[in-house]
Image (cartoon, grey):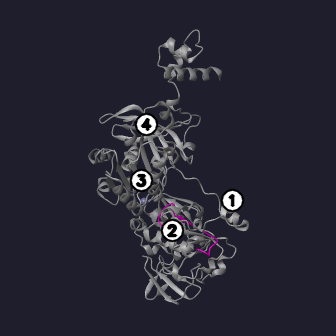
Amino acid sequence: MTTATRQGTAFDRVIEALERDGRTVKRNGPGQAQAQCPAHDDNNPSLSITDRDDRALVYCHAGCDTDRVLDALNLDPRDLFDKPKGLGHVSGLLSHAIYNYPDGRIAGRSADKKFRQSGNTKGRSLYFGQTSTGKPLGPESLDGHERVYFVEGEEDVKTVRFRGEAAVCNAQGAGKSHLADLTPLSGKKVIVVADKDEPGRKHAAQVVEHLGGIAATTSVVEALEGKDVTDHVAAGHSLDELRDASGVLGGMHPEADEGGIPDSTGLTDACRYLDVALLLDGGLPEPPTPTVCKRSDGVGLFYLGHYNVVVGDPESGKTLLTDFATVEQLGEGGRVLRLDLDHNGPQSTISRLIDFGANEDALRDSTRFRYVEPEDRNQLAAIVEDAKDWQPTLVVLDSIGELLPLHGAGSNDSDEFTAVHRLVIKPLAAAGACVVGIDHLSKGLDSRKFGPTGTVAKRRVISGSCIRVTVDAAFTPDKGGSAFLAINKDRHGGLRRASPSGDKEPSAGKFVILGGQHFITAPMSDEKNPGEHAPPADVAAITALDPPPASAKEARERLKWRDERARQAFKDWKKGTTR
Ligand SMILES: [Zn+2]
């Protein structure tokens, strides 16, 4: 990187503008900074700024459009380029990026994403990137690279090369891969990065098809955040964090179609074992951290891009907790979809959100907030399809129990739940949303201990966290209330690491509504899950028994307690005496 020698870079320009605007800016190293976003009310530093050699990449994790961020800083899209006055004209278009192809094609791109072609426009060469002086790279740039990223545009090629990997794209963007000479990809492991829109996915499917018989293997991935690999890198993610997107192409697996087991020479390839050396070369990706529904210490309960669950008895505050998350996301510039399958009704939901301090303009804005009571599976399918483009940051499913009946399925069948998960929940999470499903506890004690009602499948598909909510002080409209939060499941461990250890279901804090305030307290480092421990007074009552009881049954009889209470208190007392 040449940050030190370049003068007046776009990166410096953006940092200066942020500081001038009074935003907190934290430099994470050369060419990488984190700042408060100027386009939304930002308590966290949600804005990532990355120096990509010839331009700055800007990304708001709360979902603000880059144009809005620039607007708030009185900057222009041109200011994201080191040379804001442009590099020159291509077919009359003032271009801030000029891409030189090895066969003489020249593509120009203006700051506001207009494209023009000149030079050898009949050429069939791929774009491989170029040197800092503009000299085009050719097929030899793939030498020594076993894997090659196939992306949608020239900017994305430059982004991937900036991260030290080989990349190509065909000329003129989506839908034109049939015009390109793909033979330089012969024998390569090609990772196709699909842009997260309809043309992007279609393009990726076509590229995979055209690479059949040329590439050694193909796989399809997509950005974890944002629309394309440049957004993904701008958001601070490594290339290894691009996530599998073969599912969004409609289950298209070109490699699986060949049929039969190949002979022994091709067998290891066919097994597709993980290349651990390659993974380590690329650096192990950081596990995801929970960022949605934040406690007072800034740690979230739920994960973006994953399916999370809130489980608890009726009236325990599950829906209120998702209301809290809704208001938080709207406040951070996010987009929220509320799927009211229980038919709680819009009036009660909306008025609660306003009570919780939701911005009314955000609620009125249908690009920010959508509420729906789906009546049948077709309507739900349309909503899921629409969400792929709209890309909500938070989806609340209230409740999971109603999803199966809507699909005409029984509530306890494993296969049926897996199918509904694939149709509804998975695509929503794959679109980048933090999906939070509300699940009511069932009656039987075994399933209460186990967590969400019903099947093993229901729990297995939770790819984020499952939070158990238990009433502390019952919620009333005028006085508020509070609820204990416990970690029933945490797939990535990000929440567990920030919570006390020792309990089977560690405390994740307390959700409190008090005097018009709504917040989640973080647990003390030695806090116990009250659901797993007897109150100190109960333990004291057992300690006071003389002679000491020999069993929980004896304690129950002498103190005339309920079975469960005596068992828990006896257990805790016993633990205390043997320590
Ligand atoms: Zn923002």
Q: In front here: 58 or 200?
A: 200
The amino acid pointed to by label 1 is Val
Q: Is mark 3 within 8 Å of ligand 1?
A: no
Task: Quickly name the residue at label 4.
Answer: 441
Task: Quickly name the residue at label 1.
Answer: 276
Dot 4 falls on a residue whose secondary structure is loop
- Label 4, residues with CA under 10 Å away: few <14, some 14-19, many ≥20: many
The amino acid pointed to by label 2 is Ala
Classify the position of the N terminus by image quarter: bottom right
Q: Main secondary structure of the magenta part?
A: loop
Dot 2 falls on a residue whose secondary structure is loop
Q: CA distance from mark 1 to mark 4?
A: 41 Å
Q: In front here: 538 or 208?
A: 208
- Label 1, residues with CA under 10 Å away: few <14, some 14-19, many ≥20: few
In magenta segment, residue 532: no
Q: Are marks 3 and 1 in contact (CB under 8 Å)?
A: no
Q: CA distance from mark 3 to mark 1?
A: 34 Å
Dot 3 falls on a residue whose secondary structure is strand
- Label 2, residues with CA under 10 Å away: few <14, some 14-19, many ≥20: many
Q: In front here: 491 or 215?
A: 215
In magenta segment, residue 218: yes
Task: Quickly name the residue at label 3.
Answer: 394
Task: Quickly name the residue at label 2.
Answer: 194
Task: Measuring from the top left, give residue 168's x and y in whole percent.
Answer: 58, 76
Q: Which residues are magenta?
A: 212-229
Dot 1 falls on a residue whose secondary structure is helix
Residue located 49% across and 59% down the image: 35
Q: Are marks 2 and 3 in contact (CB under 8 Å)?
A: no
Dot 2 or dot 4: first in sequence order is: 2
| Of labels 2 and 3, the one closer to you | 2
Dot 1 or dot 2: first in sequence order is: 2
Q: CA distance from mark 1 to mark 2?
A: 24 Å
